Image (tube, rainbow, N blue to C red):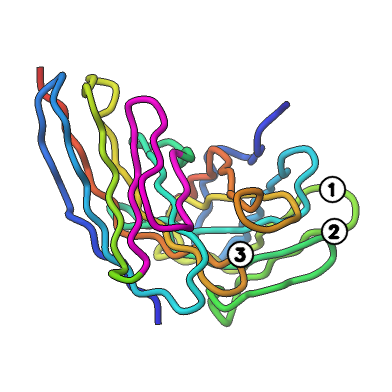
């Protein structure tokens, strides 16, 4: 089966760091994506992990542990424009993506 | 390089009418995916198509919904005899051929369907 869990909401202060955790159960797992989605807009690709470890891309980093079925997205030096939903997405057999419900991050001044 | 295009962006239909949603993938992409997002919920996979082929339609409702991706032209998601529960945002994504990183899916802006 396919299942993804991530927190519903998180609040942080501008300039701070926030870590969004995600656990997944995906048959035929072959990749973990993070997307950002602003209200009323399309999801935009942030990161992709398929091997264990940390991938850093500017202010955003993503980590994967395949043995634990666990990933996190780390957002550093938070800016107001980072207020959005962050979607943890696993890819399984047949290229099928399974989306988590998203974590709504609210950045306060 | 234009991104994934979807039209219309907003569509209003009365119960019982047909809704036709179009998606043009990114240039060079031959794989198209349709997702539905209900208000305050996550995206749910509906169907995966390549040119002239349906690869996986396991997320499509059994009745009233159909999808195609012809040799020429955009992919079409068709909903017949719409009901209020069909009101949602419908997102199309595309990816190039290949495996691994190249299979990242890029999303269009979505079509927001409202059924009155």
Residue at figure coordinates x 90%, y 56% from the top left: B71
Q: Nearer the viewer, residue B40 or B80?
A: B40
Residue at figure coordinates x 57%, y 82% from the top left: B62
Asked whether the beta carbons under mark 2 and mark 1 sit within 8 Å of each other, the answer is yes
Mark on residue B79?
Answer: 3
Q: Quarter holding the C terminus of chain B? A: bottom left
Given the current orientation, which residue lies at the most extreme right position? B72
Most common SS among magenta residues: strand
Cα separation, mark 3 vs mark 1, equals: 19 Å
Label 1 neighbour load within 10 Å: few <14, some 14-19, many 20+: few
Magenta residues span A46-66
Asked whether the beta carbons under mark 3 and mark 1 sit within 8 Å of each other, the answer is no
Cα separation, mark 2 vs mark 3, equals: 17 Å
Q: Quarter holding the N terminus of chain B? A: top right
Q: Does residue B108 lie above or below B114 as drawn?
A: above
Give the mark toward the camera: 2 or 3: 2
Mark on residue B73?
Answer: 1
Identify the image quadrant of residue A19.
top left
Mark on residue B70?
Answer: 2
Identify the image quadrant of residue B109.
top right
**Same subunit: marks 3 and 1:** yes
Residue at figure coordinates x 39%, y 57% from the top left: A52
- The image position of residue B87, as x and y in percent, is 43, 56
């Amino acid at each position: 089966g396919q299942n993804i869990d991530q927190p519903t909401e998180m609040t942080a202060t501008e300039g701070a760091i926030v870590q969004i955790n995600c656990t997944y159960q995906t048959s035929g797992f072959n990749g973990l994506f993070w997307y950002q989605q602003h209200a009323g807009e399309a999801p935009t690709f942030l990161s992709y992990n398929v091997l264990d470890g940390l991938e850093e891309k500017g202010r955003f980093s993503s980590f994967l542990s395949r043995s634990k079925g666990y990933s996190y997205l780390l957002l550093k030096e938070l800016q107001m424009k980072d207020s959005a939903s962050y979607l943890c997405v696993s890819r399984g057999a047949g290229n099928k993506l399974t989306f988590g419900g998203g974590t709504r991050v609210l950045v306060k001044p | 390089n234009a991104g994934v295009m979807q039209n219309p962006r907003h569509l209003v239909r009365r119960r019982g009418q047909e809704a036709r949603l179009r998606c043009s993938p990114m240039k060079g992409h031959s794989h198209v995916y349709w997702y539905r997002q209900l208000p305050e919920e996550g995206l749910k996979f509906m169907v995966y198509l390549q040119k002239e082929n349906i690869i996986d339609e396991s997320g499509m409702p059994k009745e009233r919904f159909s999808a195609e991706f012809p040799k020429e032209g955009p992919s079409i998601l068709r909903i017949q005899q719409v009901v209020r529960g069909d009101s949602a945002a419908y997102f199309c994504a595309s990816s190039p051929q290949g495996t691994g990183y190249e299979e990242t899916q890029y999303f269009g802006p979505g079509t927001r369907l409202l059924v009155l």
